[in-house]
Amino acid sequence: MLADRYGRVATDLRVSLTDKCNLRCTYCMPAEGLSWLPKPELLTDDELVRLVGVAVGLGVTDVRLTGGEPLVRPGVVGLVGRLAELSPRPALSLTTNGLGLARLAAPLRKAGLDRVNVSLDTVDRARYLTLTRRDRLPDVLAGLRAAAAAGLTPVKVNAVLMRGVNDDDAVELLRFCLESNYQLRFIEQMPLDPQHAWDRRRMLTAEEILDRLGAIWSLTPVESRGSSPAETWLVDGGPAVVGVIASVTRPFCASCDRVRLTADGQVRNCLFAREESDLRSALRAGADDGELAERWRAALRSKRAGHGIDDPAFLQPDRPMSAIGG
Ligand code: SAM
């Protein structure tokens, strides 16, 4: 098992397939000038499948593919197919900006993908262009429809709101998701930007988001968050729900069941970890699966009790979100 000193067990593995992305969201990447991981440092498909297989042997039951943008990794469909053959078979999901889904949703489903989360911070085309620096909203909407048609359900939509940027999109996003039968979750913005310019005052808090939604809809809390990062509310009595992932104002570290593998083969026991465990070098130096498993277990033993964002001594990790895997 991947247990830590506080009794938490990691069963949910986030795997970054690449640090590259075909959008340049203002809060996630600079317009240009972010250097990519050198190709020789990236895990090959064989290496990645092997490391995920070791994790599955250690009790990981859920594997979420992310990035960067996971759909820009060449051969992503084949990779999903290989991960679906692992035994015991993990649940397979993917976090994407949705641009590639119109083309890939059906083949991914066929290969064994179970679900997708699509990131969408506004449904206004001009604002989407400003936020992502690319005029691609129609492609995301087509991708969402393709995901639903392919049965990658429930299709979840993730949105980050920032004051003065897209805070007034909360209501429009929920309206859109209710009409389209997508499950919306708002994520509080975290200090993970490459510019290290995060400012708590610009982030929209869970409370503010709920106030805005509550002015239009009646929201009833759904009992039991479990280990899920999202707190959920029934909208107008249900069955539709809306979620908020309040990583900053209502941290859920005590029930965290996650571990991460970066595209260059480093295990991170927390999004905000300052240390990583280098499985790629061990693997390339000839470590067998037992040794890799022991390194993975050791990486979890040093997991801290909490992310520490509120600690005056908090230091933002060196890697931005796009290079860790969001
Ligand atoms: N490209 C994929 C996508 O767009 O979903 C996967 C990677 S992206 C980094 C994953 C998610 O992280 C997106 O929903 C994005 O909005 C979110 N994200 C990026 N920076 C963030 C931050 N500082 N705080 C909270 N969420 C962030």
Image (cartoon, rainbow, N blue to C red):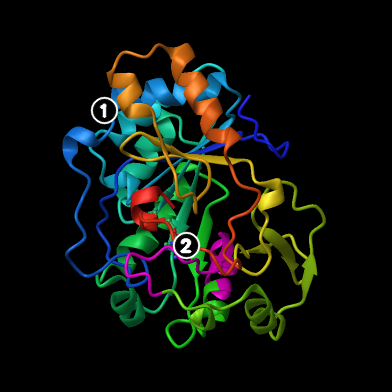
Q: Residue 181: x and y, percent?
A: 58, 60
Is the N terminus in the top left, top right, bottom left or bottom right quadrant?
top right
Q: Is residue 256 above or below residue 264?
A: below
Image point (25%, 68%), residue name: 30
The residue that label 1 is drawn on is 44
Some atom of ligand 1 lies within 8 Å of the CB belonging to the residue at label 1: no
Image point (68%, 36%), residue name: 5
The residue that label 2 is drawn on is 315
Task: Magenta stretch: give its range.
Answer: 174-197
In the picture, the disc for residue 213 is none
Q: Amino acid at mark 2?
A: Leu
Q: Residue 302: x and y, percent?
A: 57, 38
Q: Residue 15: x and y, percent?
A: 42, 39
Q: Is residue 98 visible?
A: no
Task: Please tell me which residue lies in front, 58 or 206.
Answer: 58
Q: Amino acid at mark 1?
A: Thr
